Amino acid sequence: MNKLVLVVLSMLVTSSVFAAHGPAGCGLGAVLFKDKKGIVFQILAATFNGSSGNQTFAMSTGTLGCEDAQTAKVTAISFIDNNLVALSNDISKGEGQTLNAYLTLINATLADKNTLKANYGRIFSEGNTSLDIHNTISELVKL
Amino acid sequence: MYRCLRAPIIIYENFSHSFFLCFSFLSLGNSHEDIRWLNLLRYHKHFWGYQSEVDSTEFFLHPNGKKNPQLELEETIKQFKQNINRLCEFPARALILYEMGLSPSPNFQPCEKYNQLKQKINLAAVSLVFSSYFIQKPASAFGHTFFKLRSLDSNHENNELLDYGVDFSATVTTSNPIIYGIMGILGGFDGRFKLMPYYYKIREYNDMESRDLWNYEISFNTRDLELFVAHLLEMEKATFDYYYLGENCSYHILGFINAIRPDWQLMNSLGMFVPPIETIYALYKNHNVVKNVTYRPSISVKVEKRFKLLSQEEKKIFLNITRDENLALLNEITNSQVKANIIEMVADYYDFKNAKILLGEKDDAYALAMKQKNKINLIRSKIDEKPLEISHQEELNNAPHQGHKTRRFKLGYLSENKSHGGELEYKFSLHEYLDRQTGWIPFSKTEMGRINLRYLEKTNLRLDEFSLVGVDALKPVNALSWPMSWRFKTGIKDQRFIDRQDYSPYFDLSLGASFIWKNLVTAFFIRSEQAVIFHYQKNYRFGLGPELLLIFNNDLLAFSLELCRLKMIKQLDRYYSSIALKTHLNITRNFGIYLKDEKIGTQKSAYSFGVLQHF
């Protein structure tokens, strides 16, 4: 619930920078990742070709469930939430597909990626939330 | 009333059905048998009549629509004329009816939801994605498929992180493995299509499960892309009973393409059991279906390849850092290129080893792992040199669509205990380590449903064995890890090699370690065999002992040697040994010859040779 509030708030604050294209966090149905654990379940899943619904993969469902176009815009926060490790990797290298995607989503494709790389410690300082990360990057790329 | 004359003429490449050439002349009377209508609503003809695979009632406009394509067609036309909302709910039907000359060109202007979806996706291309196998994850053994939708908006970016994904999955309603298994086989779960950001799929399969993603871009034209999005909206109303063995995720994903392009006849080659890879093979039945193939390596492949790129000295430093979790060792490196190579390896390996935590629940373990992750990345952010680039040409040469077919039979001459005859083996799926390895996990076996029959002068025709499931997961030891290799098989077999037959359920399990050198794998196991033999009073049999497995496979020639000596603890208080030498000469992708020689204790001595065919 807190996460949902965070995402909604962050959307209100930063919606002006959201691009109108790219993968929104909305879907035709909810994405369910049940927490099904245990080797027996895994072997059964293999035997019965059941790949979905038996994952231990937890993901932020940020804006999932919203069906109308008004809320179907991309949320950078949701993107960071779901791609945090890959994004931090890319920023530490100053390049990469996840960083490019994120910069596209916030309409900052011309941003100097080396500036982000040089400020890695600031962007990902301990305790920073996805919103903090987004705000710091936005500030650095002068959105 | 809208029949013939208003219809546009649609020309398909390689399309032989006459209805596409002269569909303008169809009357409403037989229009319901038009393959476009039937495929769109997933109708199949059985000997008792038509029936749709869709199980949700809201998908049909006529109460008998599930079983009657004609009534559904008539009702659809009627409701489209009376109610624009109906047309908006079923835009793909509207497009198909227009193509069939049964309705005027649909006006979707008032269709808010459909237009929003179209605008949101702005579809430029569709790929069928095959999520490949990773031997360390049993759940990946059969593969998986879903769609990747490329948007026109992000086409120039060529960035998969901006794409959408569509999958078909079951909503699992139980965590009880037994109920799960039963419901999975009997269609007890509802399956439906879901749209999501494609990065979910990347994180889930590439990073979390270490599975390679293979993109097979479908050569859809403008009409197909429009119909695809329209059909996606319709599928919101459709649920299907999910059958794990047949009508599973891959079956329905291929069925979606089949609804868009009936002329490709993609479903024709599928059998009752549908391993996901068979749906990729189906794409290649026509030479023009797949536009191009691209590859996205898993985190495990990246780690493995990057490690190979390191020099001996770099490997040594990396292993020390990883073993002691001591990043301070990096400070001792003066050469910044070496430092760049090592920190890249450290970062990738950390992601691989901690994938479950880093991509899992955001709990204390996650916070701790992220703290270490940020320490690694902070060091990397201060290095200007680029690490060595990884080439994935080797993997591209081993693409899944180049693999052998999944069913196989063997037919040959058999000599057993000086009696002569023949043998027949039929395997429902999938792969074993003596088969051609291209497209599959090397030195692995994943079998479901194998039947062995033999005919001998002395005993006539008899069932030798029915193996329900057999998996050999040989994970060779390497510098990075010491994984456990295992073998598992269960089924029923004839335990008596003489006149009388005695079918016994059995369960064999071997645990050990394997080592690889070029095309040769050597594996050592502790083996256990358990069986229930009904013929004896003490009917439970248990054996335990060492086992050796040697495999060579260079795709053309493959052989294996299996040696085992078990101490029978229950029922028979004695030792027994077995030895088996098997050879395959895989002459083509799907055809080969085999030779087998085996000896089990003093009871059985047999050899056989013949042909094998995958199909």
Image (tube, coloured by chain):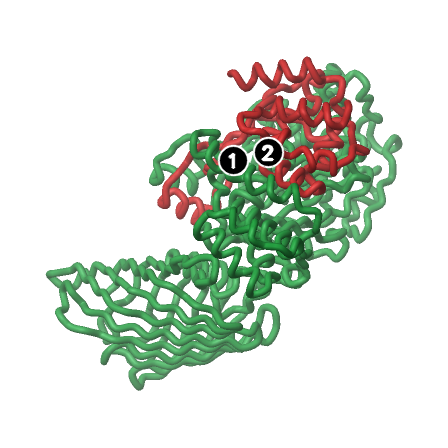
Tally of marks? 2
Rendered shade, chain B: green
On screen, residue B424 versus residue B7, left or right, reads left
Q: Are marks 2 and 1 in contact (CB under 8 Å)?
A: yes
Q: Indicate the quadrant containing the C terminus of chain B: top left, top right, bottom left or bottom right.
A: bottom right
Q: Output the letter for the chain in red.
A: A
Name the mark nearer the viewer: 2 or 1: 1
Label 1 marks a residue whose chain is B
Find residue B311 and report its horizontal and vertical position in percent. 59, 64
Secondary structure, mark 1, is: helix
| Nearer to the camera, B198 or B330 | B330
Q: Mark 1 highlights which residue?
A: B370
Label 2 marks a residue whose chain is A
What residue type is disc 2 on?
A: Leu
The single residue placed furthest to the bottom in the displayed view is B418
Classify A129 as above or below B575.
above
Does residue B92 appear in the picture of this structure?
Answer: no
Find residue B266 and report its horizontal and vertical position in percent. 66, 50
Q: Residues within 10 Å of mark 1 (few under 14, many from 20)?
A: many
Q: Do badges 2 and 1 share one subunit? A: no
Q: Residues within 10 Å of mark 2 (few under 14, many from 20)?
A: many
Q: Mark 2 highlights which residue?
A: A84
Residue drawn 64% across the image and 54% down it:
B282
Disc 2/disc 1 C-alpha distance (Å):
10 Å
Find residue B86 and report its horizontal and vertical position in percent. 70, 19
